[in-house]
Amino acid sequence: MENSPCLYVELPLTGYREAWKLQQEIVRLKSEGLLKPDVILVLEHPPVYTLGRNGGLENLCVSKALLEKEAIDLVQVERGGDITYHGPGQLVAYPLMDIQRARLSVTDLVSALEEIMLKTAAAFDIEAGRNPLNRGVWIGAAKLGSIGIAIRKGISFHGMALNVNLDLTHFTWINPCGLQKVSMTSLKETAGQTIPMPAVRQAIKQNIETVLNIQLEQLGPEALDLRMRS
Amino acid sequence: MKEISELNFPDDLKYAGNHEWSKLDNDEVTIGICDYAQDQLGDVVFVELPQVGDTFDKGQEFGTVESVKAVSELFIPLSGEVTGVNENLEDTPELVNNEPYTGGWMIKIKPADVSEMDGLMMKDAYLDMLKG
């Protein structure tokens, strides 16, 4: 069992609540022993703000009415961390892993997710780094990638978000991660040119395999659905 | 992460599959998370606990522990009513890491059915489970 490959599923642009429901269902199946392999979902979301379990609205700098007018959802979820923004052009990965079986501590998983984002940036000649005060990956004082995870019955969910080509305007409506005066950046802003998302997807997949030292079996969303029903 | 042999598991506690420990004293059971769980979580920065008077069925979520950028859910190993919560964890959540079996206890409950303690693991069985 230890050597069974981890299922790797690239989803099309997926609404936050839909992906959240899918994560919860996979966590349930895994914790009940009905789905043995670990699963990593890779996707982009339409614009959405999410708040961590212990985050409050004090770091939302605009009114909820404005969010309603712009038709941007605000969702409070069970992950760690404070408020963040997801949108098209940001690559999100959700590792749904049995961390006890993988002999990974929570801190190991957070560090591994950082390492994956650092290596992915490096694949495009962008040197990002860690910040001793805050987790995530940084270019100087600007944040390139964020992390927020949850653990339920030994299974991890939620994950990491790497800013690739997204419009950064929506981050200015919040204090990202509850940090004041933190600016956000992207691979595009740093490189001065658009970085093609398919290339970033390919790089992140390779780096997930290397950093977590796992074998990935790529499946389409329909095949995942079948595995979840069998 | 430490090796299991480096961790401490007192003989006089009962252990649950989700790594909570329970200790029966008179009519009250004290509950916390064990050395394995605190080591796996890393530095605890926030503990969310229920209120005195709340009641739970065995296996229900009774709180969460937040380590850096990660929230882990806590599941109650036996049914009962909360009779005490460790208020020290509000200001000093690191007690969960430093003293998981003493200063880092989380809640006390009046069990609905004390015999549920029999369904929990003794140290040796719990260690066998951890070693897989």
Image (tube, grey):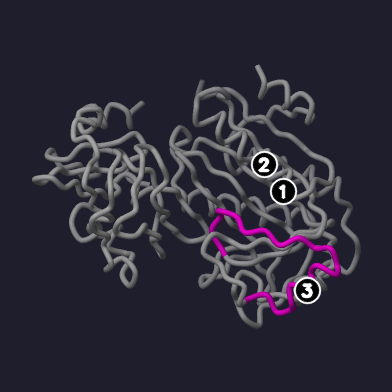
Does the residue at mark 2 contact the one at mark 1 (Cβ under 8 Å)? Answer: yes
For mark 1, give the secondary structure. helix
Q: Which amino acid does label 1 sit on?
A: Arg
How many residues crowd around disc 3 within 10 Å: few (fewer than 14), some, or many (20 or more)?
few
> Against B119, is B71 above or below?
below
> Against A191, is B31 above or below?
above
For mark 3, give the secondary structure. helix
- The alpha-carbon separation of the residues under discs 2 and 1 comes to 6 Å
**Residue at left 27%, top 54%?**
B107
**Residue A125 in view, yes or no:** no
Q: What residue type is labelled 3?
A: Ala
Residue lying furthest bottom in this view?
A: A181
**Residue at left 59%, top 39%?**
A96
How many residues crowd around disc 2 within 10 Å: few (fewer than 14), some, or many (20 or more)?
few
Instruction: Return the residue nearer the eye: A8 or A51.
Output: A51
Which subunit holds the residue at mark 1?
A: A
Residue lying furthest left in this view?
A: B26
Instruction: Return the residue nearer the eye: A192 or A95.
Output: A95
Q: What stretch is highlighted in magenta?
A: A59-81
Pointer 3 or 2: first along the chain: 2
Which subunit holds the residue at mark 3?
A: A
For mark 2, give the secondary structure. helix
Q: Which amino acid does label 2 sit on?
A: Lys
Q: Name the residue under label 3.
A: A65
Q: Residue A21 carries which label?
A: 2
Residue A229 percent coordinates (x, y): 67, 21
In which quadrant of the rendered image does the C terminus of chain A lie?
Answer: top right
- The alpha-carbon separation of the residues under discs 3 and 1 comes to 20 Å
Residue B27 percent coordinates (x, y): 13, 45
